[in-house]
Image (spheres, rainbow, N blue to C red):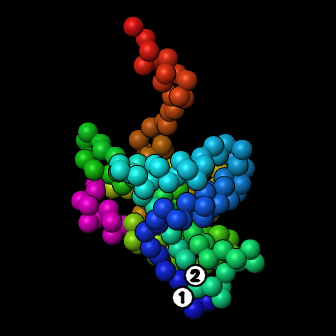
Amino acid sequence: MATFTVRPACGRDCADILRLIKELARYEEMENRVKLTEKDLLEDGFGERPFYHCLLAEVPAEYATCEGHTIVGYAMYFYTYDAWIGKILYLEDFYVMEKFRGLGIGSEILKKISQTAVQDHCSSMHFVVADWNYRSINFYKKLGATDLSKKEGWSLFEIPKKHLVKMANEE
């Protein structure tokens, strides 16, 4: 393949972002858990107060998939704050279509995200990886990532929306 570009997403990219989110979820055997719509992505990422940022990997039209897609990878991230170490860039999703892996696309996306984190004075980048995804775990470890769940014993919790509503309405 000749070239590819990594660029910030814009509102018109929401269909492709959702397509890649669903493709990643399908790979993780969790596609039925994706509830987002293009409208959600547009409002949440490109409105007055964006909740996320997204980088896209795009190939020239001559390298498009058989379905005609030229957006072949993405990284969705946002900022959070840790009371001990300050600003953190949280990598929510990172995915490159299988056909386009091994071409340096994922490395370039991670380079751009790392540059963003350094430019914004983040202390680190956090993300989660499925414990069965050894390929990704090994990839991240080669980049210097540490598994905090093993090293520090942290567990990830979730309070679903119905429980948030219940707590918010308690008197």
Please say whether residue 30 is visible from this viewpoint: yes
Q: Position of residue 61 (x, y in %)?
A: 63, 85
Instruction: Give the prevailing secondary structure in the magenta stretch.
Output: helix
Please identify the quarter of the rendering in which residue 63 is found. Answer: bottom right
- Decide if residue 82 is on the left or right side of residue 28: left
Q: Are discs 1 and 2 less than 8 Å apart at CB?
A: yes
Question: Which residue is found at the position 53% from the left and 47% from the top?
Answer: 40
Q: Which residue is mark 1?
A: 3
Find out whether residue 161 is within the magenta segment. no
Extent of the magenta region: 114-123
Q: Which residue is mark 2?
A: 59
Q: Position of residue 163 (x, y in %)?
A: 52, 22
Q: Earlier in the sequence, mark 1 or mark 2?
A: 1
Q: Amino acid at mark 2?
A: Val
- Pick the quarter of the image with the C terminus: top left
Question: Which residue is found at the position 69% from the left and 47% from the top?
Answer: 30
Name the one closer to the observer, 83 or 96: 96
Question: Which residue is found at the position 58% from the left and 85% from the top?
Answer: 60
Find out whether residue 122 is within the magenta segment. yes
Name the one closer to the observer, 10 or 107: 10
Name the one closer to the observer, 10 or 4: 10
Q: Amino acid at mark 1?
A: Thr
| Disc 1 crowd, CA 10 A, few/some/many (<14, 14-19, 20+) | few
